[in-house]
Amino acid sequence: MGVHTMRAGVLTGGLLLPAWSMADWAVNMPPGVTGTSQDIFSLHMTILWICVAIGIVVFGVMFWSILAHRKSEGHEPAHFHENTTVEILWTIVPFVILVAMAIPATATLIDMYDTEESDLDIRVTGYQWKWRYDYINDDFGYFSNLTTPLDQIYNRADKGEHYLLEVDNPLVIPAGKKVRLLLTANDVIHSWWVPEFGVKKDAIPGFINETWTRVDEPGIYRGQCTELCGRNHGFMPVVVKVVPQEEYDAWVVEQVAAAEAERQLTQKDWTLDELMVRGEQVYNTACAACHQPDGTGVPPAFPALKGSAIVTEDMPAHLDRVINGVAGTAMQAFGPQLSEVDLAAVITYERNAWGNNTGEMVTPMQVFEFKSQQ
Amino acid sequence: MSAVIDTHAQDHHHGPAKGITRWLYTTNHKDIGTMYLVFSFAMFLLGGTMAMVIRAELFQPGLQIVEPEFFNQMTTMHGLIMVFGAVMPAFVGLANWMLPMMIGAPDMALPRMNNWSFWLLPCAFLILVSTLFMAGGAPNFGWTFYAPLSTTYGPPSTTFFIFAVHIMGISSIMGAINVIATILNLRAPGMTMMKMPLFVWTWLITAFLLIAVMPVLAGVVTMMLMDINFGTSFFNAAGGGDPVLFQHVFWFFGHPEVYIMILPAFGAVSHIIPAFARKPLFGYASMVYAVGAIALLSFVVWAHHMFTVGVPLAGELFFMYATMLIAVPTGVKVFNWVATMFRGSMTFEAPMLFAVAFVILFTIGGFSGLMLAIAPADFQYHDTYFVVAHFHYVLVPGAIFGIFASAYFWLPKWTGHMYDESLAKTHFWLSFVGMNLAFFPMHFLGLAGMPRRIPDYALQFADFNMVSSIGAFMFGATQLLFLFIVIKCVRGGEKAPAKPWEGAEGLEWTLPSPAPYHTFSTPPEVK
């Protein structure tokens, strides 16, 4: 080994070791915390070991031939070929192994498809790029957005422990109960996945897919969207908080009350400053992913709002865009997604931020009237 | 009378035309084969460059080099270019060069169509690559272009992408018709179907697959075209359409497509292993039947790509069983290759090294394929890096190593020179190590929960991603060495005899090296 090679080795090692010292070299699937995930894990390990066993036999014969039956060892070639018995044998044996494997796989699959007799139903809707959870038995629902700051994503700040796997409002479910999830999507196909539950199902516009889970162990479980859904596909995590039943019940009461309070906010008299503060928050969770935090957008797919004619002049068009979206583009209809207060706040914010300074404000009542006129 | 015929016959014994027109107007299977191979290698480097961009961005967590939009364009274009630009044309190039020489034919059956099907390709890829420079960028919805992400939500360049796919499809269909017409009509007297070399057999079956599924691809992109530009709602739920229909139609094309990319490699490896083991292929007939069985099964397994879309239980079970069944004929092929090597007298020149690596690594890809076939487990594997690892294990050491093995095996016949063996071995070992370093850790990443097609990832995936990127850079850089080896071999080197490999069998080795511009004007006799 030359000096240069050694130097290169030391250099590479030096560069890599700091990263390796905090290594997380997970090489296998987590067994998970549900019956389904554990069944899947045992299927996974069974088929893996079957493959390893077949591999040892096949590669064993192969490497033995490679080492022993080489011309440089003076090995003379045999001339045998064509043997029907052998061919039949190595067709039948794998077939039998496969049948043996198919039986437990079928049983697990039947169990995974059994969504009957659930204790709780939750509708999960995929949006570009967030999840919405609707508790259809209790009449409330909310969005779940990524909370990792852009500064961490763009390496201007240290990355947190749950980088890209943290949200503002996780899905909350009670421990030990069969929860049925009804999945659909608002725009493109998404896929809802929590590895620890062994649950992955596509959320498809126009379809309602069903799946279920029962988690006995309270805790926080994390997953991600697993179907390419556009620009921020990598930035729409799934976080599920499993809590004991009593805690869950208390949480539901709180949520129902909060939903009612939110509805009443429409009646309140708002000032420009109040709307601007609320609007900035709404903008950063609902709009900034496409139109960018500074309103410059990513033209032509995501137009700039800063200095835009609609945002600075034509107020009715602005309301229409935000509430009804633009058909055939990535601009969603936010009317059904946001409350009147949030719509009013975000429109007000857009008309006054980044030097747009129109001084105009839109009240929740104006939004309410605009929506009722349609 | 006879004098007239003689003059006429002499006209046909000219060499290649001079200058650019030789390549533009040629109807010679060897020239067209060369153009296909050169084009395919150019696309391999282009698609590879995009892979380097992807791996560079994934080297560390966080966004460093590209924005997510561009990252998505890179994954999409990488897939499209590698599938339609690198792997498929490479096999058509090998078919053009080798099929006539293997069956004792003077040329392909439809030489003018042959010229046309090649020249469509650069046009198609010019259109496809030009989308990178259009407003809104290139297609960014993955090489599987699932609707409605590719229709309602696609960039404006999607229509150009559809046009490019149509042109590639026409090119492939014409190529396939040509292969079938050649094999069925131009075999030398005495060469019955069951005496055809395996590369000929696998290409015949591949050609039928192409004719069966390329129109389906054309159909699905046409439906997209209608949805985007003419107000139909095939895939738009808001208009009463069905986004899942897209996936059914796409994968009805897509699954046979993956066998289109591997069957010709099966054929080539079935020539190379017996040649360097100096021992006949263990089971010729069962190899033919196995390829036939794989091809037939490939039409009834498409929904295993869609286990999580909500296929009904009965459908789920059917597609699981059918998919597991494919392991049987695939196993037969692997066992036959190993039985051929067993008790042979092996040497390990570059073609054999690539062929042996093909068998080992393709089998590993087959194992992960079997794991993916288990539908309940697929709910965990689906759309993670485990899938990325799986299909790169079948495509890189499968299709690509198969192509390298073929290239080294037949380069002496094409150029008349031996390639530089020690450089070729270096190429092999660097590719082998780089490829495994790049793709093996992806199994771990997928199992640990990393979804595919993401530009940034959670911190627990950082270490294996860095390893994978290092391997990818190594594999990528190594391919420039292949370019150098081929250029060196074309320009000179040790003179190659008619049959440079001791154990090689077949009509192509009865011809001098380099093979003359026109071969087998008089058909040989096959006993």
Image: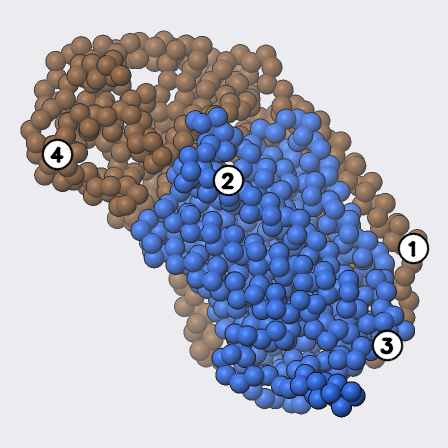
Residue drawn 46% across the image and 18% down it: A122
Residue assigned mark 2: B223
Circle 1 crowding by C-alpha within 10 Å: few under 14, some 14–19, many from 20: few
Which is nearer the N-term, disc 1 or disc 4?
A: 1
Secondary structure under tag 4 reads helix
CA separation, marks 2 and 3?
50 Å
Identified by mark 1, the residue type is: Thr
Between B459 and B145, which is closer to the camera in this rendering?
A: B145
Which of the labelled discs sits on residue A312, or is there none?
Answer: 4
From what the image shows, is residue A157 above or below residue A184?
Answer: below
Instruction: Decide if residue A307 is on the left or right side of residue A111.
Output: left
Which of the labelled discs sits on residue B525, or is there none?
Answer: 3
The letter of the brown chain is A
CA separation, marks 1 and 3?
29 Å
CA separation, marks 4 and 2?
40 Å
Q: Disc 3: which chain?
A: B
The answer to whether marks 2 and 3 mark residues whose Cβ atoms lie closer than 8 Å is no
Q: Quadrant of residue B310?
A: top right
Which is nearer the N-term, disc 2 or disc 3?
A: 2
Secondary structure under tag 1 reads helix
Query: How many numbered discs sit on the rendered protein?
Result: 4
- Residue A229 visible, this orientation: no
Disc 1 versus disc 3: nearer the observer: 3
Identified by mark 2, the residue type is: Met
- Residue A346 visible, this orientation: yes
The answer to whether marks 1 and 4 mark residues whose Cβ atoms lie closer than 8 Å is no
Identified by mark 4, the residue type is: Thr
Which of the labelled discs sits on residue A84, or is there none?
Answer: 1
In what quadrant of the picture does the C terminus of chain B appear? bottom right
